[in-house]
């Protein structure tokens, strides 16, 4: 496995009923959750560590894209290595179909929208394009309108996050620069 940036596992969300077709072995992946990942410290230092300004959401995605930009690869062991709960997913019935939605607070919605828009602008080719990210954010807005409680607070924070993500500086700070 050349240029290992990190080695991660598949995770299972305890609230989603996803059946994984898990073959044996290891594969390259664009994104993975860095919880329980084995990180190449040389690569971690080279990209400047984790972007602490992202605070709550998408720190993993930013780190994975930063590794790829520097020529490293993210590898995934095809093994469910841990359980994680993302947004306490719930199932809804909608027009003869089951829809799973993630339940994040209004506070978190801001950072989800802002950080994912920043990452799309920052990396482009290594992640979703800005247009694709905007389309995904529109899908999330529809989900909030259809299924969520506290709609106005969540929508307000979500729109503010999108705007801030589209207008804020996208430069990735090197948090390790002053460490010895």
Image: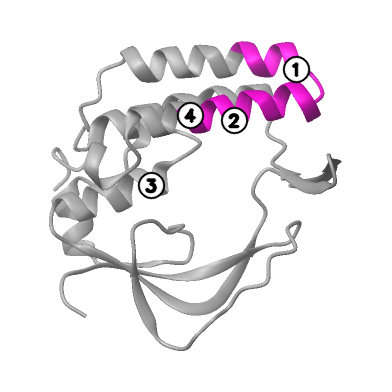
Whether residues under marks 4 and 2 lie with C-beta atoms below 8 angstroms apart, the answer is yes
The spot of residue 166 in percent (x, y) is: 35, 17
Q: Is residue 146 left or right of residue 30?
A: right
At horizontal 72% and vertical 11% (from top left) the residue drawn is 152
Local SS, label 4: helix
Query: How packed is label 2: few (under 14 Cα within 10 Å), some, or many (20 or more)?
Result: few
Single out the residue that lies furthest toward the front.
Answer: 96
At horizontal 61% and vertical 73% (from top left) the residue drawn is 20
At horizontal 32% and vertical 44% (from top left) the residue drawn is 127
At horizontal 68% and vertical 72% (from top left) the residue drawn is 19
CA separation, marks 3 and 1?
Answer: 27 Å
CA separation, marks 1 and 2?
Answer: 14 Å
Q: Which mark is residue 61?
A: 3
The spot of residue 107 in percent (x, y) is: 62, 23
Quadrant in the rendering for residue 149? top right
69 over 140 or under it: above or below:
below
Q: Which mark is residue 139?
A: 2
CA separation, marks 3 and 4?
Answer: 18 Å
The residue carrying mark 4 is: 135
Local SS, label 1: helix
The residue carrying mark 1 is: 151
Magenta span: predominant SS is helix
């Amino acid at each position: 496995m050349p240029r290992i940036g990190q080695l991660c596992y598949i995770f299972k969300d305890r609230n989603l009923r996803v059946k994984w077709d898990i073959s044996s072995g290891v594969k390259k992946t664009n994104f993975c959750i860095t919880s329980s990942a084995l990180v190449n410290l040389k690569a971690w230092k080279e990209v400047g560590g984790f972007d602490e300004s992202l605070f709550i959401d998408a720190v993993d995605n930013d780190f994975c894209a930063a590794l790829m930009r520097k020529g490293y690869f993210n590898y995934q062991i095809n093994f469910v290595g841990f359980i994680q709960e993302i947004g306490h997913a719930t199932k809804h019935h909608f027009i003869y179909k089951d829809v799973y939605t993630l339940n994040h607070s209004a506070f978190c919605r801001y950072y989800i929208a802002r950080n994912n828009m920043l990452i799309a602008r920052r990396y482009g080719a290594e992640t979703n394009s800005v247009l694709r990210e905007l389309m995904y954010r529109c899908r999330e807005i529809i989900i909030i309108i259809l299924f969520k409680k506290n709609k106005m607070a969540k929508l307000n924070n979500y729109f503010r996050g999108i705007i801030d993500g589209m207008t804020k500086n996208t430069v990735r700070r090197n948090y390790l620069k002053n460490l010895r």
